[in-house]
Image (tube, rainbow, N blue to C red):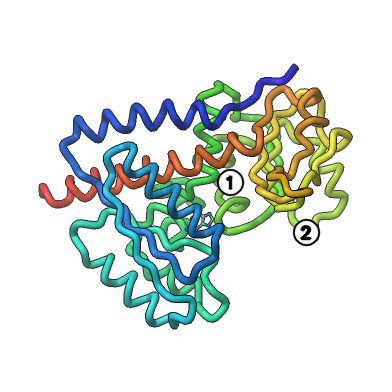
């Protein structure tokens, strides 16, 4: 019987602690979200982030731009937030509409307000082993492993998916924690063999039930980042019912990685506020 890695419970516990820390600090951190267009999934994610802010004592401001906003229009909004001394963290909800140059927008966010950890400077710091802000989903996964006392140093970790928001930073965080990391992607040869060697498997490929039990090493820790629809149901990349008896520990979908992402965003925003308050005290 495997341990269910309960991201909902751990995130609630951490948010409770964070709420007290924010109260004790006397600070009033503020997060600004920028959403372009009216994609219902993005709107829902942004609403969840605002709700989480409210729960812990972080102020939140939502900037909503129409779907036909130009790259310059989004850059202007980001620059206004960069200059606003009352805003500590900026999150531009992705994906942006096709016509908007996401890379330019991400690079325009001030690195010290980049609570998403997507700015090239923050990515560079992470990959050079000196992380500042690191992206929320992989950081939340590291926290989950830490809270469940799952050893990372020296183990073989396999990350499936090389996205800029999950796969790549995940591989860097695991490397920084002394795992031996393999980063797999769509061109990986013998993918199933690579996956089966994992002591810690992180799947972030976005294919419903792609990971089947015969692909998992007995006793592996299985982390499922996928959020997919299958027959009208929300499911992960991992066939949870079939894999849970082979894994030593496994995240459910929903209730695993997702809540940890939001808790990490709150933690990053508080950190941005604390660091700003140190700067302004100089
Ligand atoms: N779109 C889906 N998840 C995220 C996230 O964590 N941050 C941003 N900026 N966009 C997202």
Residue 143's spot in the image, x, y percent?
Answer: 50, 33
Q: Residue at x 55, y 37 (%)?
A: 141
Q: Residue at x 87, y 49 (%)?
A: 190
Q: Is residue 116 above or below residue 153?
A: below
Q: CA distance from mark 2 to mark 1?
A: 17 Å
- What kind of element bears circle 2? loop
Q: Residue furthest front?
A: 232
CB within 8 Å, label 2 to label 1: no
Q: Residue at x 60, y 53 (%)?
A: 168
Mark 1 Cβ and ligand 1 under 8 Å apart: no
Image quarter for residue 241?
top right
* Front-lying residue, 16 or 139: 16
- What kind of element bears circle 1? helix
Q: Residue at x 35, y 65 (%)?
A: 63
Whichever of labels 2 and 1 marks the residue nearer the N terminus, that label is 1
Pointer 1: what residue?
170
Residue 282's spot in the image, x, y percent?
Answer: 11, 49
Left or right of 187? Residue 50 is left
Residue 236's spot in the image, x, y percent?
Answer: 70, 43
Image quarter for residue 70?
bottom left
Mark 2 Cβ and ligand 1 under 8 Å apart: no
Pointer 2: what residue?
186
Q: Is residue 140 above or below residue 45?
A: above
Number of other residues with Cα within 10 Å of mark 1, as a class: few under 14, some 14 to 19, many 20 or more:
many
Q: Can residue 112 be seen here?
A: no
Left or right of 241? Residue 100 is left
* Front-lying residue, 174 or 209: 209
Q: Can residue 223 be seen here?
A: yes
Q: Is residue 97 above or below residue 8?
A: below
Quadrant of image for the N terminus: top right
Picture disc at residue 46: none
């Amino acid at each position: 019987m495997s341990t269910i890695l309960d991201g909902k419970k751990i995130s609630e516990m951490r948010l409770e602690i964070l709420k007290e820390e924010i109260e004790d600090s006397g600070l009033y951190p503020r997060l600004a979200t920028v959403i372009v267009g009216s994609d219902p999934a993005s709107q829902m994610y942004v609403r969840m982030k605002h709700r989480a802010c409210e729960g812990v004592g972080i102020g939140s401001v939502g900037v909503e731009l129409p779907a036909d906003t130009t790259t310059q229009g989004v850059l202007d909004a980001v620059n206004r937030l960069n200059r606003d001394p009352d805003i500590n963290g900026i999150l531009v909800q992705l994906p942006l509409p096709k016509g908007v140059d996401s890379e330019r927008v991400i690079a325009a966010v001030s690195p010290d307000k980049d609570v998403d950890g997507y700015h090239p400077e923050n990515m560079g710091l992470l990959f050079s082993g000196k992380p500042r802000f690191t992206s929320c989903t992989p950081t939340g996964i590291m926290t989950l492993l830490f809270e469940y006392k799952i050893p990372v140093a020296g183990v073989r970790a396999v990350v499936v998916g090389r996205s800029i928001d999950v796969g790549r930073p995940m591989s860097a965080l695991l490397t920084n924690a002394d795992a031996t990391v393999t980063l797999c992607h769509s061109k990986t040869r013998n993918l199933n063999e690579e996956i089966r060697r994992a002591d810690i498997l992180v799947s972030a490929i976005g294919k419903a039930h792609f990971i089947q039990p015969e692909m998992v090493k007995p006793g592996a820790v299985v982390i499922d980042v996928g959020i997919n629809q299958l027959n009208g149901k929300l499911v992960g990349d991992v066939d949870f019912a079939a894999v849970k008896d082979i894994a030593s520990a496994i995240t459910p979908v929903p209730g695993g990685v997702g809540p940890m992402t939001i808790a990490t965003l709150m933690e990053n925003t508080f950190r941005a506020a604390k660091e700003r308050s140190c700067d302004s005290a100089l």
